[in-house]
Amino acid sequence: MGDLIEKFGEPEQYWTEIGYGEDREYLEISLFYPVKGIAATLVIDIEGDLKQVEIKSSSPLMRVTFFDPSLLDDLLETNILIDTPQTARTGSFNPWRGYGAITYDVE
């Protein structure tokens, strides 16, 4: 995570979505650089009932996607930048405020 921010600067916004694995809940966080055409995704396990996770510079990225910025709106209608299908999404965009705690609502 730290390498991404060092190379490309701070993202403008991020998207959060709760996901469910075999034995766990997790928060999928997609960081967006809409002008630069970059989306980076990380997954952080949800522990307990805290309703927040912490993003650190050491948080590992799951993937980084580079795209043509003029196609952002079209790509958001697909599963390319955000894994959850558009019709099933319950997450939201938020302004990036830096490292630290990210709170989320339980569905």
Image (spheres, rainbow, N blue to C red):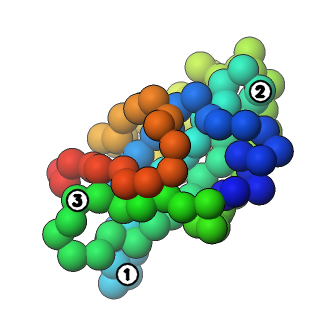
Write down the residue under mark 3: 51
Instruction: Work out which residue is located at the far top of the displayed protein and give it.
Output: 70
In front: 76, or 52? 52
Q: Are marks 2 and 3 in contact (CB under 8 Å)?
A: no
Task: Kindly report the distance in space between the C-alpha atoms of the residues bearing marks 1 and 3.
Answer: 20 Å
Q: Name the N-terminal-most of marks 2 and 3.
A: 2
Q: Secondary structure at mark 2?
A: loop
Amino acid type of the residue that numbered disc 2 sits on in the rendered structure? Lys
Q: Secondary structure at mark 3?
A: loop
Write down the residue under mark 2: 36
Q: Name the N-terminal-most of marks 2 and 1.
A: 1
Tell me, yes or no, if residue 75 can be seen here: no
* Mark 2 crowdedness (10 Å alpha carbons): few <14, some 14-19, many ≥20: few
Write down the residue under mark 1: 22
Q: Are marks 1 and 3 in contact (CB under 8 Å)?
A: no
Residue 107 percent across, percent down from the top left: 18, 51
Q: Residue at 74% of width from left, 15% of height from top?
A: 70
Q: Foreground mark, 1 or 3?
A: 3
